Amino acid sequence: MSTSTAISILQCGKTYPNGTRALETVDLEVVSGETLVLLGPSGCGKTSLLRMIAGLESPDAGGRILFGSEDVTAQPPETRNVGMVFQSYALFPNMTVAQNVGYGLRIRRLPEERRRARVAEMLEMVQLSALSARRIDQLSGGQRQRVALARAIAVTPRVLLLDEPLTALDAKLRESLRVDIDTLLRKAGITAIYVTHDQAEAMALGDRIVVMDHGEIVQIGSPTQIYHAPANAFVADFVGSVNRLQGNVQDGVWRCGNAALPWPADAPVGGVVMVRPEDLRLGHEAAGAISGTLTARYFLGNRTRLLVDIGQGAPVLVDTSERGEFALASQVHLRIDPATMIVLPA
Amino acid sequence: MKRSPLFYAQLGFTLLVCAFMVVPMVLSVMAGVTTNYFVGIKSGLTLKWIVQVWDLYEKTIYLSVGIALACVAITALIGVPAAYVLAQRQGRIARLIEELIVLPVAVPGLATALALIQFWGPYPEFRTSWVFILVGHVIFTLPFMVRPVLAVMLTGNLRSLEEAAATLGAGFAQRFFSVVLPNVRGGVLAGALMVLTLSVGEFNITWMLHTPLTMTVPVGLADSYASMRLETGSAYTIIFFLIIIPLLLALQYWNNLLRRNDQA
């Protein structure tokens, strides 16, 4: 199966009848075959945008949605040929697993034999062949999610839309299903748009991530770009943890404690310096480092998170994979690799 | 296991309440098969009153059952789409209509009947046909179909089920029949049970709307109590039970059967 359609969202905004502005006017190009993740806190407009692409909401006047070169703005969902996976799964309780997966094929009047073959293929893909005759209420959450996925892909949609498909599941299952979904999307080569508020999910699945906030697109980029070169403080904060460090810039050098780092030439004047917890290294000497007092430590298995008071109000977060005692109230010296310094407009 | 005194107190109270409701019914049923109610059981048991009622009022029974079944069909045909629209619209007008549908239950049946007679009086053929009574029953029982169906529609995630069906290519009619209806069947059946019982037992409106040729069972019951021996009226009550109980059991059985099929 290889259906991949590029999607263009042109000047689309969404205002609900009660006056709520869910989405500011945005433009977005989805490359054919890619997995694009819409990431943002709840109420940021990501679901509204997804529902618009599905045809479940219509954009405000002037907005247009193209599938390839075809303008689908005025088309209802049933003629758009999209596959959608809902947060609540939305599986039909009056049908079996196989009937759910075959629903779209039945609507398309596919001959019984081909329909059966396709359903079997889909169930095998999501490893649920043994449960084809089960009722939906006899399935676990993870199984339901896989049925929903199989049902959406069975119709060979032009684009697969996933609305927080893993939110309702527990952490462990979420992680394993994330891998399954990723493998599936790669294999199918299908254009997919994935909505989530979970940055780890976005990082793992997205070819590109669109970070949204208050109905606006804040940044579009690859997971590494979003993480290492966030467009603003909101993105830096939302995607992973980050420390804001106060210092002084003088003669092209930024100083904080005993640390002195070259101030990037393209950095904005009065910019704020941010450093990820894992980019702060523990050193043994005070010279050239930011020193502070260890106030708390949390062993997290693969790493230890330290809270260090450097006299700037909020404690600095440090993630280290070193094994050590990390005695509380001890002196800690932190070093920063200039390459990991993120400078953003204040 | 040793039961506490509280258990026996509760059991006693429950039995007392049951007796309060059941004893008069039993007495009435007994009266229907007693040769002479005033003499009592010792006057002997007989089926002659039942036979007499059957001879006199047989037609009322067919009419009642016919009207009740037609009433269930029509309230389902109107009520389910109405509930669907009300479930879709969350506005104030929708809520107002929801309340308006219930109005005929609050307004005395006599008033509803009077309004119908005033309006349809000029059309004697309609006025004297059994369909006229059916109209009254539909007006009165419609909320009992709309309410349970609406409740089921609002509790489930019917909206996202419909959306899922739409994204899978199903148009409105396909969605309605393959997804909406099967998933609100419980509400429709609950409504049908209510409508059926209410229609069979409806007296207020029917009493005003009926003609001597369009008498239903409850009207016939009043007629027999008013114009004949007490035993005849009681025999009529027995026949009433004989109609309504199997009807209800059949519906309940059908409901259970569907549910079992679902689980199979």
Image (spheres, coloured by chain):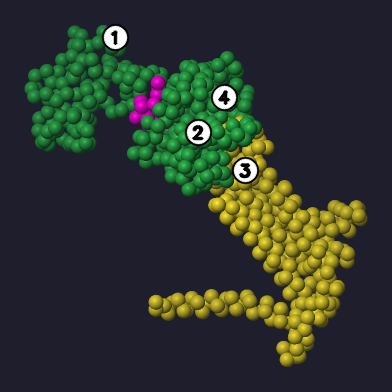
Chain colours: A green, B yellow
Q: Whole-Å distance between the Cαs marked 2 and 1?
A: 51 Å
Region rendered in magenta? A196-207
Marks 4/1: CA distance?
A: 38 Å
- Give the image location of residue B105, x and y in percent: 70, 58
Marks 2 & 3, CB-CB < 8 Å contact: no
Q: Are marks 3 and 4 on the same chain?
A: no
Is A93 on the left or on the right of A304, as rendered?
Answer: right
Q: Secondary structure at mark 1?
A: loop
| CA separation in Å, label 2 and label 4 | 33 Å
Does A180 sit left or right of B53 as displayed? left
Residue bearing the label numbered 1: A266
> Mark 3 belongs to which amino acid?
Val
Q: Chain of mark 3?
A: B
Q: Are marks 2 and 1 on the same chain?
A: yes
Which three-letter amino acid code belongs to the residue tagged 4?
Answer: Pro
Depth check, mark 3 against mark 4: the one in front is 3
The magenta stretch spans residue A200: yes
Can see residue A236?
yes
Is residue A129 inside the magenta stretch? no
Type of amino acid under label 1:
Asp
Between disc 2 and disc 3, the foreground one is: 2
**Is disc 1 surrounded by few (<14), some (14 to 19) or many (20+) residues within 10 Å?**
few
Chain that bears disc 1: A
- Vertical arrangement, residue A336 with respect to residue B81, above or below: above
Give the residue pinned by disc 4: A59
Residue under numbered circle 2? A122
Gap in angstroms between the C-alphas marked 2 and 3: 25 Å
